[in-house]
Image: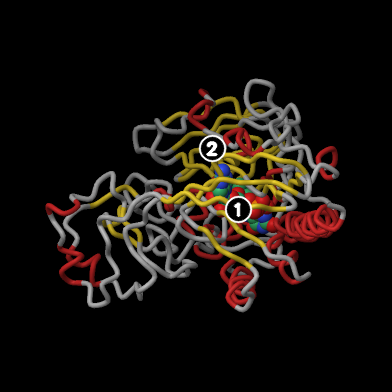
Amino acid sequence: MTAALEAAEMGRKVTLVEREPYLGGRVIRMAKYFPKLCPPGCGTEINFRRLRANPRVTIMVDSQVASITGARGDFTATIKTRPRYVNEKCTACGDCEKVCPVERSDSYNYGMKNTKAIYLADALAMPFRHSIDMSVCKGADCGECVKVCKYEAIDLAMEEKTTTITASAVVHATGWKPYDASRIENLGYGQIKNVINNVEMERLASVSGPTEGRILRRDNGEPPSVVAMVQCAGSRDENHLPYCSSICCLVSIKHANYVREQYPDSDVYVFYIDLRAPGKYESFYRKAMEDPKIHFIKGKVARIEEDESGRAVVTAEDIIGGGKTRVACDLVVLATGMEPESKSVAPLMAKFNPDGFILEELQGDAGLIACGVASGPFDVTTSTQNSTAAALKAVQAGARR
Ligand SMILES: Cc1cc2nc3c(=O)[nH]c(=O)nc-3n(C[C@H](O)[C@H](O)[C@H](O)COP(=O)(O)OP(=O)(O)OC[C@H]3O[C@@H](n4cnc5c(N)ncnc54)[C@H](O)[C@@H]3O)c2cc1C
């Protein structure tokens, strides 16, 4: 969004291609973002407004680039757009949801909630329009949504569209996905109900999430009194993600804040190897250290096991205190890293570094530019800064055609 807006505000025509039915990437799914701890909707709403006001940006949601050919100054991209089965007349009134008889697991909430087959991804979704999940919808055999829609917005016969565009430059901004924590055998993810990952914690803490913002145990819905954060869950590990995602320590400190704010009597344990809070983030970390109920324990977690009451028992080394420590927790949050999505975007003519991030600099002169987490594991500030730089490089690629 940032790269598209900056290039458009420099007078260029931009096509913004987004795979999901909504804009905002992973950020829009967070409850709050550090360091200010404000809801991400505030920042993204500013960009949505800039987008609405800029006729030079064509937004293509539900879309993916199938192929790119050509060279700097003269690329041709083929874009496939999935049918959404709901057109732009939709006002998101929600009458269709009330009559829809089918439920589906909601991937926006990482499967922690169900929606109807016709759904609105989020209360702040842009575009603010429903979608139908045709993998579960009964289609014309049901048609209840079509009957109830006052706006003739539902079209069950909608088909996939193919669009071809030409462009001077291509900006890869494909971001990341959470590392699959079930691959880390000793940490119990997927086996112990009260072991979750950090993106799930964001949805639990979000007012639009499955618990309307209340952080609750996953087995019995009770408020937790002891919560642990396990750092470097799969990160800096040759068997999983060999690199540091750079944000996980700050994310866990943010999560400790979420818990402490909701439950003043709670204790939070942060198990870490090294805590990384560079530059302006140092004070964010220092503030958390002042809270006597947030306990930072330097030591690698050896294992997590479930006890008979469903609590998750964390066993770790305690390098500074000495010996082993065992803490029985109501909820454990694994600080899983960001894995580049770019591995799945082979048609984009991209070149990758050994960790799977798209090479940024080497390709700039070729009119192929990467930004945000597609180019490295960054926070939002760094992502928006290098996206602004990407827009400039893209404009230069066009000027030198
Ligand atoms: C748990 C967690 C919490 C975090 N909290 C914070 C925080 O509080 N503060 C902070 O500064 N940073 C935070 N971060 C980091 C932040 O999420 C990233 O910096 C940010 O998401 C980077 O934005 P991006 O646009 O590069 O990638 P993304 O947010 O991943 O967006 C990429 C977009 O590209 C789309 N896409 C992917 N592939 C394709 C394709 N082939 N075709 C079309 N579209 C595609 C995706 O659907 C997505 O919309 C957090 C990270 C984690 C793991």
In the rendered image, residue 299, in percent from the top left (x then y), is placed at 69, 32
Q: Residue at x 45, y 66 (%)?
A: 207
Give me the C-alpha separation between circle 1 and circle 2. Answer: 57 Å
The three-letter code of the residue at mark 2 reads: Val
Q: Measuring 48% from the left and 62% from the top, which residue is drawn there?
A: 206
Closer to the chain start, of discs 1 and 2, is 1
Residue 151 appears in the rendering: yes
Q: Position of residue 210 (x, y in %)?
A: 38, 57
Around disc 1, counting alpha carbons within 10 Å, would you say few (fewer than 14), some (14 to 19), or many (20 or more)? Answer: few
Which residue reaches farthest top?
Answer: 239
Where is residue 391, by image quadrant? bottom right
Residue bearing mark 1 = 165
Crowding near the residue tagged with mark 2, few <14, some 14–19, many ≥20 C-alpha atoms within 10 Å = some
Tell which of 125 and 302 is nearer to you.
Answer: 125
Residue 9: which numbered mark, if any?
none
Image spot of residue 385 (x, y percent): 79, 59
Q: Secondary structure at mark 2?
A: strand
Q: Residue at x 48, y 29 (%)?
A: 182
Q: Is residue 253 visible?
A: no
Residue 327's label in the rendered image is 2
Q: Residue 391 vs residue 38: left or right?
A: right
Amino acid type indicated by mark 1 = Ile
